[in-house]
Image (cartoon, helix red, strand yellow):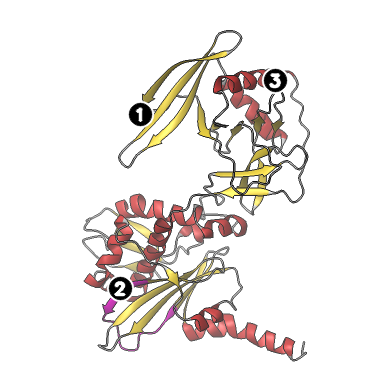
Amino acid sequence: MAVTLNTTTCIYCPSTGPFTKEHIFPAGLGGDDAFQLEDLVCGHCNTKVFGPLDQALMRRSPAALARIFLMTQGRRDGGAPQLDSNVVEMADPISHLVEEMEIVAGGKFRVRPQMLFNGIMCPVQATDADDMQAFVAKLASTLTDAVHVIVKEKTESSTSFHITTFAWDGSKYGQTETTTEKQLPAIGVWRETLTPSKTAKPDWIYVSRLFLRAEGQLVVRVLPQDDLSAILNNARMVLDLLQKQPTFTSQSTEKPDVHIGMTMDMNLVHRAMAKTGVNHVCQEYGQAIVRLAAFDLVKQAINTGSPQINAQGWVDPKMERIFTQDQRPVHLAMLWPVAQPDGTFNILFGIRLFGTPFQGIILAEGVALPLGAAPVIYTVHYEERRTERQTLAEYLIAAVVPKLLDEGRTRAGLS
């Protein structure tokens, strides 16, 4: 199944290597190891360009929400799917305090271990005793006589860290200095601004919060009007109580009212889709086709982001309705050659993830293909990590016709 051809340069850039294997469909979305391009994509494109694009598609896109609910595993050897959300939060049904949450594989919600700074009361929350124990240990190692509070600043060319140090004088913390560094301190607290959701309900109560991410970072989200020194003072006081009385009682919330905030860059997402399309063209028609000048513009857009990829709904609404009959746990990747009067073809790529509507991208125009070139569909069974290549007729017979026949029997009153 793999395409293995001798070549001197990457099909996406002028690099002469070293080369890596490239899944034609992202492995983190269930791409089959049997369908890979070999010795055709350089390590720079694969790692520095395609890696961030695939991550945007899998973690920060509409498909990412479906992935976290529907996939139990990311890459075959890469652990569970993750969602790069800015914030996931829930209002406690009794106190109405807004708590920090996270979504894990299977679409399950977990309360992050946290402190909520609500006046003189500082409730402490966690999903289970293990999380609480990890939270207390992290606090104990961080809230020492010198606490480093970190704010990350990233530009197109560099990343730096503003580090504010708070010193303990025996009774309270006080700010001592702020520096800008290129390297992170060994231990610190990440500071973020807490912004109430625009969709929050009127009875939701937002207070500053200190929480532990699953990856191990201690984060303080602060309301603009709150004083960080006072928050650190309260956190150290509560830590003393937790260390003296380490009991924990688990509670569950039925049907939590959850808000999810996520930043999506759809240009990155569409570039990832277009890259997947070019990979399929190379798999289907060979490297000579994707090296044609007709593909230069789309490859430039994939590599640089300019011009912007224009992904739209499928061009044929009737055909789109046919594909909605396929409700199996699959992705679809379709190459659709559109014949032109001069005998060439425009190559349209369609991708349908987790049963959502097709996104269509024109990859190239005026391409010479064998006479009679016809649509082909790659069906990706994402939980099985198995891919089928089918003609349109084979696909319809396998996936659509049986469902239509079942519906016809049901309407006719037949079992």
Q: Quadrant of the C terminus?
A: bottom right
Q: Which residue is mark 1?
A: 182
Label 2 secondary element = strand
Q: Can you give x and y, in whole percent of width and height, for residue 389 in the image?
A: 46, 76
Tell me which corner region of the image, top left, top right, bottom left or bottom right, holds residue 202.
Answer: top right
Cα distance in 3D space between marks 2 and 3? 64 Å
Which region is colored magenta?
A: 362-376
Label 3 secondary element = helix
Q: Which residue is mark 2?
A: 364
* Residue 369 among those drawn in magenta: yes
Q: Amino acid type of disc 1?
A: Lys
Q: Of discs 3 and 1, which sits in the foreground? A: 1
Q: Which residue is mark 3?
A: 243
In the displayed structure, 205 sits above or below 415; it is above
129, 58: nearer the viewer: 58
Res 197 visible:
yes
Is residue 66 toward the left or the right of residue 315 in the image? Answer: right
Please tell me which of labels 1 and 2 falls first in the chain: 1
In the displayed structure, 347 sits above or below 2; it is below
Res 42 visible:
no
Tell me which corner region of the image, top left, top right, bottom left or bottom right, holds residue 153.
Answer: top left
Crowding at label 2, few (<14), some or many (≥20) Cα neighbours within 10 Å? many
Q: Can you give x and y, in whole percent of width and height, for residue 294 in the image?
A: 25, 72
Cα distance in 3D space between marks 3 and 1? 35 Å
Q: Amino acid type of disc 3?
A: Gln
